[in-house]
Image: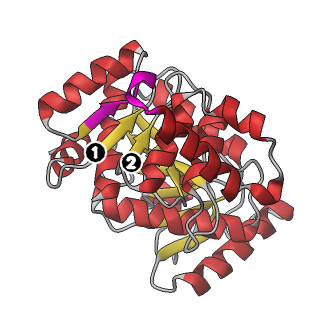
Amino acid sequence: MDTIKKIRQKAKDKIKTIVLPEYDEKRTQEAAKIIEGEGLARVVLLAPDQIKESDRQRYIEQFHEIHKAKEIDIEIIKNLFNDTLYTAAMMTREGKFDGLVAGASHTTPDMARAAIRCLGIDEHITIASSSFIMVVPDCVYGDAGTFIFADCGIIPEPTSRQLACISLATSELAAKVLGITPRIALLSYSTKSSARGRGVDKVVEALKILKDMAPDLLVDGEMQADAAIVPEVAQIKYPDSPVGGKANVLIFPDLGSGNIAYKLVERLSKARALGPLLMGLNKPCSDLSRGCSVEDIVDCVAVTAIRAQ
């Protein structure tokens, strides 16, 4: 059974309720029909007329209280809640929904801000980041062509500690959603000191921090991408690595490289890219590319439902 079929099947194991606040977006509407038809989740297309005005006002007041230290003007908050996205996120925070999926008609920064502000940061992970499940056809690398790439959407220049936190969150997602043992490569333009630079030092330090945080994880770095996924190259460049040539979780040193890599792999190899899956939040939440297909929405909802199980 391929990765997408496994995800959809796993979503059916324990049905969860996922809110889709982009109620008037045609792809989202079509996806909701497929999700309900296949029994992947219960979905709620949250339209304004489904929201009681008293509830909306209560969420505005709660949001204002949560962020009072930032002194956000109440009128600005009221404007935010004119969009069903913020109400949906607060309802998810409250437990009325098990997860949130949006982004077909919102930018990633808008979606990420709403999710972080309303759902809050998981104290276990400490930062918000994002990942993509990449399913590459006819590929022998990774986990039979399946990888997770991170961070591809949130943190422009992660510090060493942030890279370690991204790695930890991504490893947990890999195990929960895909049921695989994560083999993590911290990527760089260098493989074990073949080159020098601040970027290399940052990745080396990230590995030390991550090993302190989670000593049982299968992880190594710094490592070039070919040494991470191609066994023959790993044998030449880094034969002693525990993950060299067989990594299935690729952690990029910065947002630019991660975002460029996932888009290139998606377009050049006709891979499926599920995400961005927002990580490090108190509730499961997935962003969508504004260029997403109906199938992308369906599968992101399935992933979000599994994360909520």
Residue 3 sits inside the magenta stretch: no
Residue at (43% x, 16% y) in the render: 25
Amino acid tagged 2: Gly
Q: Is residue 63 visible?
A: yes
Q: Nearer the viewer, residue 206 or 110?
A: 110
Residue at (17% x, 55% y) in the render: 14
Decide if residue 38 is on the left or right side of residue 240: left
Which portion, as a residue range, is magenta?
43-52
Q: Relative to residue 251, is residue 202 depicted above or below?
A: below
Residue 102: percent from left, percent from top = 47, 33
Amino acid tagged 1: Thr
Residue matched to label 1: 17
Q: Nearer the viewer, residue 66 or 229?
A: 66
Q: Is residue 197 visible?
A: no
The colouring scheme, among rainbow, by chain, secondary structure or one colour, is secondary structure
Q: Relative to residue 65, is residue 216 depicted above or below?
A: below
Q: Which mark is residue 99?
A: 2
Is the C terminus in the top left, top right, bottom left or bottom right quadrant? bottom left
Q: Is the C-beta separation of discs 1 and 2 under 8 Å?
A: yes
Is the N terminus in the top left, top right, bottom left or bottom right quadrant? top left
Direction top: furthest residue: 26
Mark 1–mark 2 Cα distance, whole angstroms, equals 7 Å
Residue 61: percent from left, percent from top = 63, 48
**Crowd rating for badge 2 (residues with CA inside 10 Å; few <14, some 14–19, many 20+):** many
